[in-house]
Image (cartoon, grey):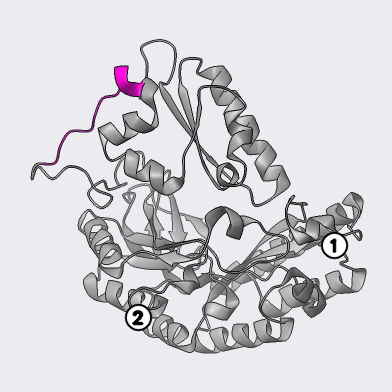
């Protein structure tokens, strides 16, 4: 909602608290919003706001802290939004009612068309029941919960009818999806049956949540479920994994990767790895490098360990020096680049379904961005030979 000459009336800052550095950046973003929009109400939501709401309220009287579900509900109803943010009463312009007179709901407002990405995310789950020693997200988001399957299927159907050709299922811990006796594989089967027009991509999923049934369903879907998984590793040393309170060993992770590749030889695997976790030795890091080579990752997101206040790892006395973390991050990033190049070379000349995006770019099933012909329209899903 824009004012006539003094910027926005409302600014929403969606915060992150996964690391101490991330939280610093979110506070900086709130201060910038207050400075650049002197008449705006600044709504702060997300994980950092859930952890320390008072710290954000103390920044300025114009700051309103709101939970994600509270904000989502309020933005669908004018009176709820103005109740949450009273200063908007004089400037709020309500969304027009639907033709059927029922008002807006989360399914009726489709994020599709000009100004939106060609890949659309559908959130199916939130919260986390794990307690990794470096992470505070489970505190910020609370216990795991799942959206009703009927609601997810209806949203999926509406997007495919609107022309969306790739839908990403997302959540904080998506593999724990459980709703009325259904798990993630059951939900995927229902989505596959609801429409054959779109490709489904699973977002990040924890290793222990990848069931044999899920593997089999992906393998049999003939690409309708993208043969790509983001499978967080975090460390290649079983000792470090134990101290992170990760619920698997390096050996179990490798066994899962072997089963995935056996079922889907063309599978693309990306991952997250933390370097410099407290107590990580040179030998531990060497095991991580070896694991990355063994698993043939197509992309590695490298995270130098950052202390997060309120977590067990942050108070350990055996913190890895910053210069050592930097060197390890650089070495892993360099290996990640080489592995990514190798993964693409294996695919060069093969045919994959590619989602056409803007500016002559496309995203392959295996999650590589490639150049595509300019005459192809954004949003198309087409078979192309990888250059």
Q: Position of residue 293 (x, y in %)?
A: 73, 75
Label 2 vs 1, first from the N-terminus: 2
Nearer to the camera, 291 or 126: 126
Q: Determine which quarter of the picture holds residue 338.
A: bottom right
- Residue at 43% in and 43% down: 359
Q: Residues within 10 Å of mark 2 (few under 14, many from 20)?
A: few
Which quadrant of the figure contains the N terminus? top left
Residue 165 belongs to the span the image colors magenta? no
Residue 91 belongs to the span the image colors magenta? yes
Label 1 element class: loop
Label 2 element class: loop
Q: Which mark is residue 336?
A: none
Nearer to the camera, 357 or 17: 17
Up-down relation of residue 19 to residue 173 (above or below): above
Q: Which residues are magenta?
A: 88-98
Single out the mark in the foreground, 2 or 1: 2
- Residue at 88% in and 57% down: 319
Q: Determine which quarter of the picture holds residue 305.
A: bottom right
Q: Which mark is residue 278?
A: 1
Q: Determine which quarter of the picture holds residue 163.
A: bottom left
According to the picture, the residue beneath numbered tag 2 turns out to be 181
């Amino acid at each position: 909602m824009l004012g006539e000459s003094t910027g926005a009336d409302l600014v929403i800052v969606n915060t992150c608290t996964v690391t101490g550095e991330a939280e610093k950046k979110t506070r900086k973003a709130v201060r910038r919003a207050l400075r650049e929009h002197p008449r705006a109400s600044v709504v702060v939501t997300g994980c950092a706001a859930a952890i320390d709401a008072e710290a954000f309220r103390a920044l300025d009287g114009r700051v309103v802290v709101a939970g994600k579900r509270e904000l989502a509900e309020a933005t669908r109803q004018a009176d709820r939004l103005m109740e949450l943010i009273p200063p908007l009463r004089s400037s709020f312009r309500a969304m027009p009612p639907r033709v059927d007179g029922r008002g807006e709901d989360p399914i009726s407002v489709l994020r599709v068309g000009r100004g939106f990405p060609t890949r659309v995310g559908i959130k199916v789950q939130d919260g986390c029941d794990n307690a990794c020693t470096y992470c505070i997200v489970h505190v910020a988001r609370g216990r795991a919960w799942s959206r009703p399957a009927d609601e997810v299927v209806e949203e999926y159907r509406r997007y495919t009818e609107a022309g969306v050709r790739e839908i990403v299922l997302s959540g904080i811990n998506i593999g724990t999806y459980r709703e009325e006796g259904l798990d993630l594989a059951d939900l995927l089967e229902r989505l596959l049956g609801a429409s054959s027009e779109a490709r489904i991509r699973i977002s990040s999923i924890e290793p222990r949540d990848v069931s044999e049934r899920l593997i089999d369903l992906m393998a049999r879907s003939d690409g309708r479920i993208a043969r790509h998984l983001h499978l967080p590793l975090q460390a290649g040393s079983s000792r470090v994994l134990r101290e992170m309170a990760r619920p698997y060993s390096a050996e179990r992770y490798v066994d899962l990767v072997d089963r995935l590749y056996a079922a889907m030889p063309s599978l693309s695997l990306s991952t997250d790895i933390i370097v410099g976790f407290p107590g990580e030795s040179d030998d531990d890091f060497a095991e991580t490098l070896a694991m990355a080579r063994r698993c043939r990752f197509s992309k590695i997101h490298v995270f130098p360990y950052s202390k997060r206040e309120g977590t067990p790892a942050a108070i350990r006395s055996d913190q890895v020096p910053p210069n050592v973390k930097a060197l390890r991050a650089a070495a892993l990033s360099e290996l990640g680049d080489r592995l990514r190049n190798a993964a693409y070379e294996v695919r060069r000349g093969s045919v994959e379904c590619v989602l056409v995006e803007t500016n002559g770019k496309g995203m392959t099933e295996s999650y590589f961005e490639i150049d595509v012909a300019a005459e192809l329209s954004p949003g198309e899903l087409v078979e192309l030979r990888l250059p």
